[in-house]
Image: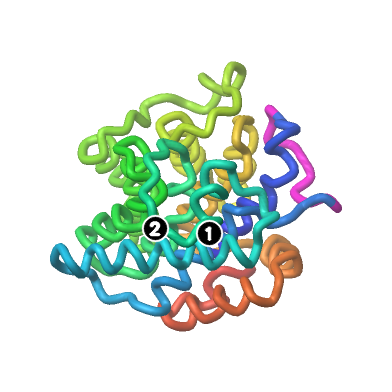
Amino acid sequence: MLGAICGDIIGSVFEIHNVKSEDFELFSRESSFTDDSVLTVAVADALIFNNKPAKGYFRGLTRQREYAYRYKQYYSRYPYAGFGNMFKNWAAVNELNRQNSYANGAAMRVSPIGFAFDNIDDVIQEAVYSCKYTHNHKEAIQGAKAVAVSVFFARTGCSKEYIKKYIERYIKMDLSFTLDSIRKEYVFDSRASYSVPPAIVAFLESNSFESAIRKAISIGGDSDTIACITGGIAQAYYKTIPSYITNKCLSILDSGLKKTLYDFNKQFNISYDEINQ
């Protein structure tokens, strides 16, 4: 999931000030982690606590609550990380109400699920569970499923063409466009159906982790979230992230987020030797 965090941090300065080019400085004094990283780590924390597939109706309900409690817990720790108003209103109260958001928040945080399970059915089911209390809407759920299966297939050695065809056939998401065809007119819109497909296409068109992040940010729009999604998939596929990116991003994360990241990597055998150059 470090790739997702790197994408978020690099994209953080471009969410408001979009660039429509792949030629930009990766970091500035304003680079920071946002709610995208915080909730990605929250999902990872839930999986560290319990990574057994939740089979059956009642175990599924329990797993949904486990994710929801982690979201609330991490919001309380990082309330100023840039959360949207709808999420803040949900997270700030004790009750576990279901929200029907169709935004990209479920997709941006889901990458740890693709690293934690070794069965595609479990990956899909867990992605759905992770959505249920905050993004209980078909559009958001489809976006989360698409990202989770992309990470899973990328991690397990599948080709880009296989990933693309699977998502188009089984998730029913159109990935037939190019970034060049949408870049000029692309604007900020946090709907999952609008922002998840370009994030996946940015990965498909890339030739390295850095290339993937640059392509994701070059689209414009919700840059940190798009790059967060792309980064999670790109890490799983390329297996390496340049050390000048990881070192800078790790220096920006606080100790609590880093500890959970390290614990997740240890539990799921994600070696830093594999993701540093």
Residue most extreme to the top: 185
Question: Which residue shows up at 64% across the image and 68% down it?
Answer: 277
Instruction: Please state which of the two labelled residues, at mark 1 or mark 2, is closer to the viewer.
Output: 2
Which residue type carries mark 1?
A: Leu
Residue 246 in the image: state x and y as whole percent. Answer: 67, 65
Tell me what residue is drawn at x 37 percent, y 61 percent: 114
Q: CA distance from mark 1 to mark 2?
A: 17 Å
- Asked if residue 111 lies left or right of residue 76, the reply is left
Please give the range of residues in magenta. 20-29
Q: Earlier in the sequence, mark 1 or mark 2?
A: 1
Q: Are marks 1 and 2 in contact (CB under 8 Å)?
A: no
What is the magenta segment's predominant secondary structure?
loop
Q: Is residue 135 left or right of residue 27?
A: left
In the depicted structure, whether residue 254 falls above or below residue 104: below
The amino acid on which the numbered mark 2 sits, given as a three-letter code, is Leu
| Residue carrying label 2 | 96
Q: Dot 1 corresponds to which residue?
A: 39
Residue 10: % across, % down: 69, 50
Question: Looking at the rendering, which quadrant does residue 251 occupy?
Answer: bottom right
Q: Residue at x 49, y 55 (%)?
A: 232
x and y, in percent, of residue 228 in the image:
56, 50
